[in-house]
């Protein structure tokens, strides 16, 4: 299980996972006031997708806790049983958190996580390995970055690799490539939509071909701009060969994202985390070229 990736969710959830009860005894059937229920539900929502605690989550989801959205509720003595479930859940998550924090990979600023969909053959694994070489290893071994790929470990779930890339500069370069790949992927999707719309207009073949060609030229220009912007920021040079390598890396990562691959930092540094795209909202991503240019 990927305890490191879930560490942030666990850390946020633990302070919320508590059931506060007060004995009132005025009604034989409803003897306790339970409070702080909104925070308790919020904490559960933070960790409900973590493997190995499904049974505990299921017990809580079936209980009176989810029969209303109130923050305070009167409950009977028999309904206080969920306090024991919450206690067990707290112990498990605290253990997971400690395991993550004692790992040599935890908060390693020079490392990344690569999450890929299920692999069913060595041929499939080899294809991913070749793509990652083009997408990550080649650009970070440039003399300006001095990066080096080293596989630190792997985990289950989807397939997760922990990769050291040698330097902070390499992590930042990979972030830039991933961000540009997200932009290119979005532009390709937009171009496809425009092309399909153009077909519905029943344009003549020549007009449709001109439209499609214009879309290709625009996409090529955007890719050129993204690669040049990254080279100007990350490298001490921007020879044509360097730009072509970056364009290959960006295009490769865009294709990997389409297959469900996610490349993320292990570092908890907020700035580094923000420099990687949000893979759940890639349709909202915008080019960072203006920001890159203003930083120089």
Image (tube, grey):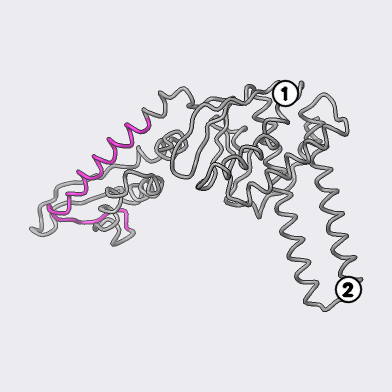
Please tell me whether residue 198 is drawn above or below residue 150 in the rendered image.
Answer: below
The answer to which quarter of the image holds residue 181 is top right
- Which corner quadrant holds the N terminus? top left
Residue 293 % position (x, y): 81, 36
Circle 2: element type:
helix
Towards the viewer: 210 or 86: 210
As drawn, the label of residue 122 is none
Q: Is residue 218 left or right of residue 73?
A: right
Per the image, the residue denoted by label 2 is 205
Q: Mark 2 and 1 residues: CB-CB less than 8 Å, in contact?
A: no
Residue 145 % position (x, y): 72, 23
Per the image, the residue denoted by label 1 is 145
**Dot 2 crowding, Cα within 10 Å, few <14, some 14–19, many 20+:** few
Towards the viewer: 31 or 211: 211
Residue 54 % position (x, y): 32, 49
Q: Which residues are magenta?
A: 70-97
Q: How many marks?
A: 2
- The structure residue drawn at horizontal position 75% and vertical position 55%, both measured from the top left corner, is 187
> In terms of secondary structure, what is the magenta stretch mainly?
helix
Circle 1: element type:
loop
Q: Is residue 77 left or right of residue 273?
A: left
Please tell me whether residue 235 is drawn above or below residue 223 in the rendered image.
Answer: above
- Give the CA distance from mark 2 to mark 1: 48 Å
**Dot 1 crowding, Cα within 10 Å, few <14, some 14–19, many 20+:** many
- The structure residue drawn at horizontal position 66% and vertical position 40%, both measured from the top left corner, is 131
For discs 2 and 1, the disc positioned in front in the rendered view: 2
Residue 251 drawn in magenta:
no
Please tell me whether residue 182 is drawn above or below residue 209 in the rendered image.
Answer: above
Towards the viewer: 241 or 269: 241
Q: Is residue 234 left or right of residue 148?
A: right
């Amino acid at each position: 299980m990927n305890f490191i990736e879930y560490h942030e969710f666990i850390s946020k959830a633990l302070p919320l996972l508590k059931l506060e009860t007060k004995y009132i005894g005025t009604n034989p059937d409803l003897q306790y006031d339970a409070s702080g229920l909104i925070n308790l539900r919020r904490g559960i929502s933070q960790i409900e997708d973590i493997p190995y605690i499904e049974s505990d989550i299921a017990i809580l989801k079936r209980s009176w806790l989810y029969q209303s959205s109130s923050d305070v509720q009167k409950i009977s003595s028999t309904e206080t049983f969920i306090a024991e479930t919450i206690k067990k859940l707290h112990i498990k998550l605290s253990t997971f958190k400690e395991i993550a924090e004692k790992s040599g990979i935890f908060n390693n600023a020079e490392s990344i996580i690569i999450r890929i969909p299920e692999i069913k053959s060595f041929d499939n694994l080899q294809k991913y390995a070749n793509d990652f070489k083009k997408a990550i290893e080649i650009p970070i071994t440039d003399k300006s970055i001095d990066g080096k790929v080293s596989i630190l470990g792997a985990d289950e779930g989807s397939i997760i690799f922990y990769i050291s890339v040698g330097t902070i500069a390499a992590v930042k370069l990979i972030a830039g490539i991933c961000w540009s790949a997200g932009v290119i992927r979005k532009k390709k999707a937009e171009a496809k939509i425009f092309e399909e719309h153009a077909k519905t207009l029943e344009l003549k073949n020549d007009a449709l071909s001109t439209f499609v060609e214009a879309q290709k030229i625009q996409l090529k220009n955007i890719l050129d701009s993204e690669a040049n912007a990254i080279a100007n920021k990350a490298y001490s040079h921007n020879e044509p060969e360097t730009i072509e390598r970056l364009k290959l890396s960006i295009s490769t990562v865009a294709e990997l994202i389409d297959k469900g691959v996610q490349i993320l930092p292990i570092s908890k540094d907020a700035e580094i985390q923000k420099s990687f795209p949000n893979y759940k909202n890639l349709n909202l991503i915008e080019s960072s070229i203006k920001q890159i240019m203003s930083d120089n």
